[in-house]
């Protein structure tokens, strides 16, 4: 399909026919990437920086790889260190019986 470049403010643009916009899922305000290479202008939908994260984390959990890597309590060694640094006693409010 052939189209014409038109002036839009101080820029120029190409009107995307409705059937192409509909087929590609482009609507007013859709973020896009524009690249020029080999005498071609390529317009693609911009991907979210977090696209695919939900699926990846779901798979991670399903594979059993989502275990807590840091303790959810402060152990006695950490309390001793914090007391030495601060110069005052720190009370551990954890319910961990290993204290």
Image: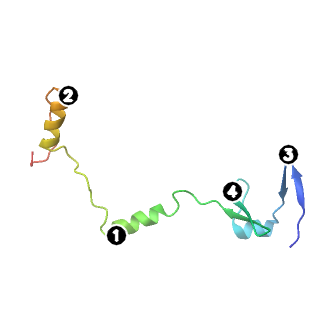
Which residue sits at x=17%, y=41%? 78
Instruction: For mark 1, give the secondary structure.
Output: helix
Splitting the image into 4 quarters, where does residue 81 fall?
top left
Which residue sits at x=15%, y=32%? 83
- Of the image marks 1 and 2, the number of the one nearer the N terminus: 1
Distance in Å between CA atoms under marks 4 and 3: 21 Å
51 up-or-down from 74: above or below:
below
Residue 51's spot in the image, x, y percent?
Answer: 53, 61
Distance in Å between CA atoms under marks 4 and 2: 53 Å
> Which residue is label 2 attached to?
86
Residue 31's spot in the image, x, y percent?
Answer: 67, 55
Residue 77's spot in the image, x, y percent?
Answer: 13, 42
- Of the image marks 3 and 2, the number of the one nearer the N terminus: 3
Distance in Å between CA atoms under marks 1 and 2: 42 Å
Label 1 CA crowd tier, 10 Å (few <14, some 14–19, many 20+): few
Q: Which mark is residue 62?
A: 1
Question: What quarter of the picture does the C terminus occupy?
Answer: top left
Asked if residue 93 shows in the view, the reply is no
- Of the image marks 4 and 1, the number of the one nearer the N terminus: 4
Q: Is residue 27 left or right of residue 57?
A: right
Splitting the image into 4 quarters, where does residue 63 fall?
bottom left
Q: Which mark is residue 10?
A: 3
Distance in Å between CA atoms under marks 3 and 2: 61 Å
- Of the image marks 3 and 1, the number of the one nearer the N terminus: 3
> Which residue is label 4 attached to?
30
Instruction: For mark 2, give the secondary structure.
Output: helix
């Amino acid at each position: 399909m052939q189209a014409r470049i038109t002036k839009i403010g101080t820029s120029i643009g190409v009107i995307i026919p409705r059937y192409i916009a509909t087929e590609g899922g482009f609507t007013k305000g859709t973020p896009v990437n524009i690249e020029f290479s080999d005498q071609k202008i390529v317009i693609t939908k911009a991907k979210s920086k977090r696209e695919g994260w939900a699926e990846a984390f779901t798979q991670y959990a399903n594979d059993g790889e989502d275990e807590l890597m840091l303790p959810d309590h402060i152990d006695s060694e950490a309390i001793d260190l914090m007391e030495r640094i601060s110069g005052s006693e720190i009370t551990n409010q954890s319910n961990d019986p290993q204290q």
